[in-house]
Amino acid sequence: MPKVAVLGLDSVPPEILFDKLLEKLPNFRRLYKEGLHGTLRTCDPPITVPAWMVMMTGKNPGELGIYGFKHRKGYSYNDGYIVTSQNVGAKTVWEVLSDAGRRSVILGVPPGYPVKRVANASTVSCFLTPSGD
């Protein structure tokens, strides 16, 4: 079975990485030349949390109900919450792969906290993980 790695560099403009820096980054240059690559169009709004979940679920922000890092409760501007993995109701690509008996490794894909238990998957949470304080 073939192995696939998806490497996402959040907020890195392709023209900077591929046109200006590629010759200075030998590992990226090798991935670029020997692998497949392309520019993805982001979602609206182009914010980290919904963009990653759009890519990993195939759903748009409206279907996911995720529009940013923080959401309001009701109509309040003062009462809100930080989006977590528990707010993602759609199946992610690694959950679909797991259902098919395939293994996955998920590293730092937001929102990755709390880590969801997925058979056949090893997961490392993301930068949204709260501190232990």
Image (cartoon, rainbow, N blue to C red):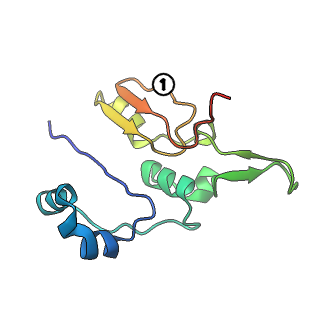
Task: Label 1: state its secondary structure.
Answer: loop
Instruction: Point out residue 43 in the picture as x, y percentages from the top left corner.
Output: 51, 65
Total numbered labels placed on residues in the image: 1
Q: Nearer the viewer, residue 112 or 75?
A: 112
Q: In this view, does 86 lie above or below 72?
A: above
Q: In this view, does 20 lie above or below 66?
A: below
Dot 1 crowding, Cα within 10 Å, few <14, some 14–19, many 20+: few
Tell me what residue is drawn at x 29 percent, y 27 percent: 101
Instruction: Write the residue at 69% across / 45% down.
Output: 82
Q: Which of 15 and 49 is in front in this view?
A: 15
Residue type, mark 1 in image: Arg
Quarter of the image where one finds residue 63: bottom right
Toward the viewer: 35 or 18? Answer: 18
Eyeballing the image, is 20 above or below 98? below
Residue reaching furthest to the left: 34
Q: In this view, does 120 lie to the left or right of 3?
A: right
> Where is residue 124 drawn, in percent x and y?
43, 33
- Determine which quarter of the picture holds residue 15: bottom left
* Left or right position of 4 against 117: left
Which residue is painted at 37% across and 28% down in the image? 121
Disc 1: which residue: 117
Quadrant housing the N terminus? top left
Quarter residue 77 falls in:
bottom right
Residue 56 position, x and y percent, is 43, 49
Residue 38 locus on image (x, y percent): 27, 66
Q: Would residue 10 be found to the left or right of residue 100 on screen?
A: right
Q: In this view, does 102 lie to the left or right of 93?
A: left
Location of the C terminus by quadrant is top right
Residue at 39%, 23% in the rendered image = 119
